[in-house]
Image (spheres, rainbow, N blue to C red):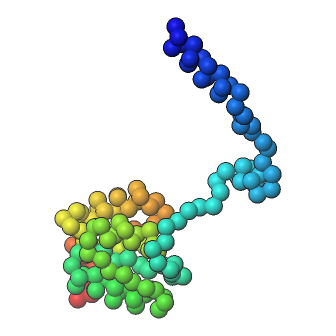
């Protein structure tokens, strides 16, 4: 019983402590409460580019070079191209690209699967698969 009495004494001291009260927000705090979204946070590893590059990925480097040459003839001269050959590079650089063009499989992952991954992660990002085996008429027309 003496233990219980001593515990009661300790807890009654806490009951007399000052309590926190909720005060209405004023000024900038009121704006933050009214618009709970607040500013968007972004991680920037380098300075942002004004022009987002076209990302060429997959296939061999010769295939990517061929696609880049073809696109350079039809796209604006200010278009920047980046070439990557690994799946992790595509996934890392895709958000910073204006579009992704796949020239074949990446790390033994079929281009169709990479397209589905990118569509799931970045629904607004245009992804194009350029596969010469799927378009034999286009290959014959260039020859």
Expressed as whole percent of the image width and height from the top left, the position of residue 100 reads: 38, 72
The quarter of the displayed image where residue 58 is located: bottom left
Residue 121 visible in the snapshot: yes
Is residue 141 found left or right of 6 in the rendered image? left
Residue 134 visible in the snapshot: no
Expressed as whole percent of the image width and height from the top left, the position of residue 69 reads: 33, 89
Q: Residue lying farthest front?
A: 2
Vertical relation: 10 (above or below) 19? above
Q: Residue lying farthest top?
A: 1
Expressed as whole percent of the image width and height from the top left, the position of residue 35 reads: 71, 52
The quarter of the displayed image where residue 75 is located: bottom left
Vertical relation: 19 (above or below) 33? above
Q: Residue at x 39, y 83 (%)?
A: 81
Residue nearest the viewer, comparing 1 with 11: 1
Expressed as whole percent of the image width and height from the top left, the position of residue 41 reads: 56, 62
Q: Residue at x 60, y 17 (%)?
A: 8
């Amino acid at each position: 019983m003496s233990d219980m009495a001593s515990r009661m004494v300790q807890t009654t001291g806490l009951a007399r402590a000052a309590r926190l009260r909720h005060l209405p927000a004023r000024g900038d705090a009121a704006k933050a409460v009214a618009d709970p979204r607040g500013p968007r946070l972004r991680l920037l590893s380098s300075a942002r580019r004004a022009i987002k590059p076209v990302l060429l990925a997959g296939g061999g480097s010769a295939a990517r070079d061929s696609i880049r040459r073809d696109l350079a003839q039809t796209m604006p001269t200010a278009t920047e191209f980046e070439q990557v050959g690994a799946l992790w590079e595509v996934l890392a650089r895709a958000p910073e690209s204006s579009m992704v063009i796949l020239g074949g499989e990446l790390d033994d992952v079929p281009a169709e699967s990479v397209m589905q991954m990118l569509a799931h992660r970045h629904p607004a990002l245009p992804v194009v698969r350029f596969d010469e085996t799927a378009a034999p008429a286009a290959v014959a027309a260039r020859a």
